[in-house]
Amino acid sequence: MKKLLLVLAVIAGKVVHGQELFVFTEPASNMAARSVGLRLNNYLMHDIHTRKNNYHLLPEVMWGISKKIMVHGEAFLSNRENSFVAEGGSVYLKYRFLSIDEVHNHFRMAAFGRASYNTGGIHQMAIDFFGHNSGYEGGVVATQLINKVAISGSVSTLHVTDNGEEKFLYGDKNRTAVNYTLSVGKLLLPKEYTSYSQTNVNLMVELLGQSNTGTGARYLDIAPAIQFIVASRMRIDLGYRYPLVDELHRIAPKGYVFKLEYNLFNLY
């Protein structure tokens, strides 16, 4: 763990211009006002019990209502139950309440909430509102951009409910958890901006953790990723998630994430 924190510190210390768009987490900044984003989230996760790869497809629509408020809506589809079916969806809302802008850097803080509904089977104690569990989440996120480097952290509380008629199997005392994240990203290319049509290449690493408040069991994952932003409208993400600490039971703790996104600006 000490070596990992040292690596994060070295990345963060190479301060020069940067992006603040992460693959596994949302930053405190919002998308542009009066814009709509269309995103396809693809998760290929290795099931430790069946030894098969579970495929989750989460189509998502994002709306920048104003410079302070944005909302996401997404659907859940997967082949986890041996056939590719729709299993539910979620709504995510973020409100940016603090902005501090300076030359070559800025700081943002935002509050966010998520409500998810899922009809699939419950297979793990870990709470996951991206295609596994029903429930709700609330938290805060802070993001610092300094030239080419962005650093973002969040903390949130989660409460899981039953998945339709599928009961949560792990007891009422274990329905609540705390999520915590730390993300560091750096803009690699272009070295200098000459036009909005240039392709941006961002490299990042994220730490993703959860602790169950009932048992105290936790997990902590590391998730390196690379990101391409094409013509300031299209975004392509590729990442891999792997557990460093794995005390909290999950059926598929590691796997790949592939995202495609396209943004439409100044729609009204």
Image (cartoon, grey):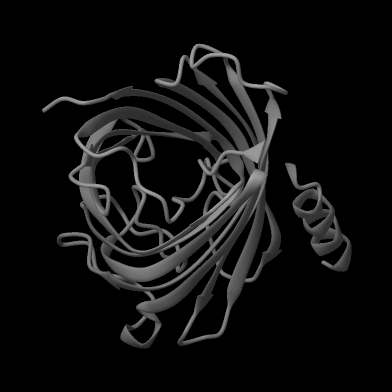
- Quarter occupied by residue 158: bottom left
Quarter of the image for the C terminus: give it. top left
Q: Left of 163 or right of it: where is 141? A: right
Q: How many marks?
A: 0
* Residue 98 in picture, x, y percent from top left: 38, 66
Tell me: residue 146, above or below residue 238. below
* Residue 10 in picture, x, y percent from top left: 84, 53
Residue at 59% in and 23% down: 200
- Quarter occupied by residue 234: top left
Question: In terms of depth relative to the viewer, which is nearer, 199 or 40?
Answer: 199
Tell me: residue 193, above or below residue 173. above
Residue at 40% in and 69% down: 140
Quarter of the image for the N terminus: give it. bottom right
Residue at 74% in and 41% down: 16
Question: In terms of depth relative to the viewer, which is nearer, 194 or 32?
Answer: 194
* Residue 133 in picture, x, y percent from top left: 31, 58
Q: Left of 176 or right of it: where is 88? A: left
Which residue of the protein is positioned furthest toward the left in this rendering?
268
Q: Left of 89 or right of it: where is 206? A: right
* Residue 231 in picture, x, y percent from top left: 46, 14
